[in-house]
Amino acid sequence: AIAQSGMRLPDPFERLNRSEKKLLQNQANSMFSVTEPAVKASSKSTVSIYSLGKRIAFGTAVRTKKNQPAILTKWSEVSDIRAPLSLATSNGKFYPAKVTGVYPEHDLALLSTQAPLTPIDLSDAANPELGNFLVLARPDGKVEGIGVVSVLARSLREKDKAYLGVMMDFSKAGKDGVPLERVMPDSGAMKAGLQRGDVIFSVDQKPVTGAMEMRNILQRLVPGSEIVIQFRRTDQEKTTTVKLGSRADNADIRRIPAARMERMQRMGTAPSRVRSDFPNVIQSDMAIERNDMGAPVLDLDGNLVGITIARGSRIKTFIIPADVLVNTLAFDPTPVQQALSKRENT
């Protein structure tokens, strides 16, 4: 309703007095300070990227396929910059930098520089679980952002999203399950025998009582995979196996109009220009800025999780996992002009 009417989000500080605001700020500062040990090592591998005196992104020092040190950052934040790029290392010194290659699928760019770099160790990576705390490193050893893992690693590409083929009536959901409002024609659900009025109460032995459980289950699955659904029809409990389809192959899926989605994503934040279609990202609620992309993300033990790649909306920040970075850097990047030409043609 807020998105449809164009209303602004309420300011959480609006009704607080000066002392209450100061108390909250002090609490936030204390939390950021106590997590600084987690980013101490990785901060040495973090740089700030500038153009015309303005920081446009962060970057992380890595080793390329040829074992050369380079900077990895968000390509769409540097690709259209006509002025020379420079970077500031953890010692505060500035050096010229230049984009030398691109990994378009991940919106990543490699920057070369004569700056002394400390490449981050991508092999010693963490595998975070839902709810784990994450912190974002700055070059000065401070913490730029704090959040939790809200969705485990998954693809954001439409062709990789699993499609069950049902509309569920979540207004009538409860401890006994979620009733089906509609079963889509030719879907995996219809082929498996599901009907309108059936009440789904378990998927792959995980209880389903609302939208959150159903979303979390489906987001981790891919087209072609099979799930076992337990449901209730009248007074009988039944079990069926459903082979999932792809959202990209189903034009009848009810989607939010692009203009409305754009308004929703921009409420309360300035999202990244490129913030979708990534083949593998972790989602966090970390509240950071668009120019904070390209920095390393750590768990509270200081283990590398990945690097930030997009601010999706007020509650979504996307992170490329460390193992994906390892696999990506095993290949030569696309030449810059070739990547630009391909982007213009698409």
Image (cartoon, rainbow, N blue to C red):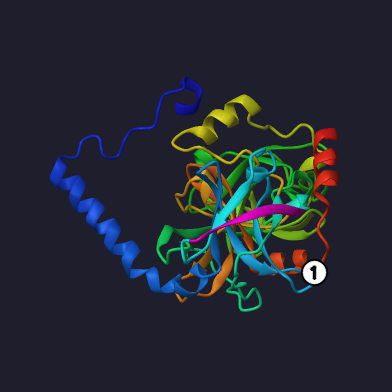
Judge whether residue 144 can be spotted in this image: yes
Number of residue marks: 1
Task: Identify which residue is drawn at 40% across, 63% down.
Answer: 142
Q: Residues within 10 Å of mark 1 (few under 14, many from 20)?
A: few
Does the stretch in magenta take in 187?
no
Q: Position of residue 244 (x, y in %)?
A: 78, 52
Task: Report which residue position mark 1 lands on.
Answer: 330
Which is the main secondary structure of the residues drawn in magenta? strand
**Residue at the top extreme?**
5
Q: Where is residue 336 in the image (x, y as percent from the top left)?
A: 80, 48
Task: Identify which residue is drawn at 76% across, 56% down.
Answer: 222
- Determine whether 184 is above or below 308 in the image: above
In depth, the one of 28 and 157 nearer the eye is 28
Q: Where is residue 172 in the image (x, y as percent from the top left)?
A: 51, 40
Tell me the SS state at disc 1: loop
Left or right relative to 298: residue 186: right
Read off the magenta span: 93-101
The quarter of the image holding the C terminus is top right
Task: Identify which residue is drawn at 80% across, 51% down.
Answer: 192
Does the stretch in magenta take in 95?
yes
